[in-house]
Amino acid sequence: MSLPEVEVANYLANDEKLMQQMASLRIDKLSYAPVFTGTPDDAFIKASSAPWIRVTPIPGDDAIYSDDARLFEYPRVQVDFWIRKEKMAHLEELQQRITDTLYSHGFNRYYKDRYADPDLDGCLMVTANFEGFEMKGE
């Protein structure tokens, strides 16, 4: 496995249905999939760019050992997306699509929340934590 946040970002960016759903809700038309592994430039961060996704790693290193070697690892990431409040009726379908996409790649959601973003007027920040599974090779 490469960096888990990069893998998860690629899974989401390559989900055509998710990208189409997001594009239909966005005021600004983009020529790329707005899925980032860090915070995008300040010029991008505005309500008209929403929805967009940020994937970041969650610190920690959970693993199962056998004979002093790692047998399984459980990478964790946080997936955040922003949506304009007037499009809140679509929040659940986006959240479910993200969850389904990541589940199909071996990541399970174990936490979710949403709140008004104090730094981005008119937008909600939706957040979820996911844990993956990786069997270590010999």
Image (cartoon, helix red, strand yellow):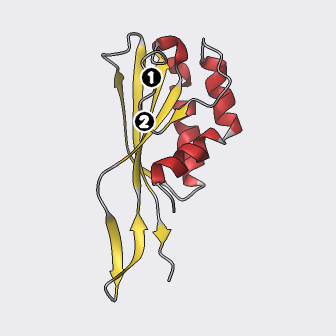
Please state the horizontal and vertical placement of residue 121, each as a whole percent of the image: 38, 10
Q: Is 21 above or below relative to 84?
A: below
Residue that carries the numbered disc 2 in the rendered image = 38
Give the vertical position of 99 relative to 43 (above or below): below
- Is 67 situated left or right of 104 in this image? left
Label 2: few (<14), some (14–19) or many (≥20) C-alpha neighbours in 10 Å: few
Quadrant of the rendered structure where residue 78 is?
top left
Q: Residue shown at 65%/16% (left/top)?
A: 29
Q: What amino acid type should be assigned to the residue bearing mark 1?
A: Asp
Q: Where is residue 19 in the image (x, y as percent from the top left)?
A: 65, 32
Q: Nearer the viewer, residue 120 or 3?
A: 3
> Residue shown at 50%/55% (left/top)?
107
Q: Which residue is drawn at 34% across and 19% down?
A: 116
Label 1 CA crowd tier, 10 Å (few <14, some 14–19, many 20+): few
Q: Name the residue under label 1.
A: 41
The label number, if any, that marks residue 55 in the structure image = none
Q: Which amino acid does label 2 sit on?
A: Gly
Q: What element carries label 2?
A: loop
Q: Circle 1 sits in a helix, a strand or a loop, which is it?
A: loop
Task: Please state the horizontal and vertical placement of residue 119, each as a whole percent of the image.
Answer: 32, 16
- Residue positioned 62% across, 39% down in the render: 13
Q: How many labels does the image show?
A: 2
As drawn, the residue found furthest toward the bottom would be 67
How far apart are the two marked residues, 1 and 2, measured between alpha carbons?
Answer: 9 Å
Position of residue 61 measured from the top left corner of the image (x, y, whole percent): 31, 62
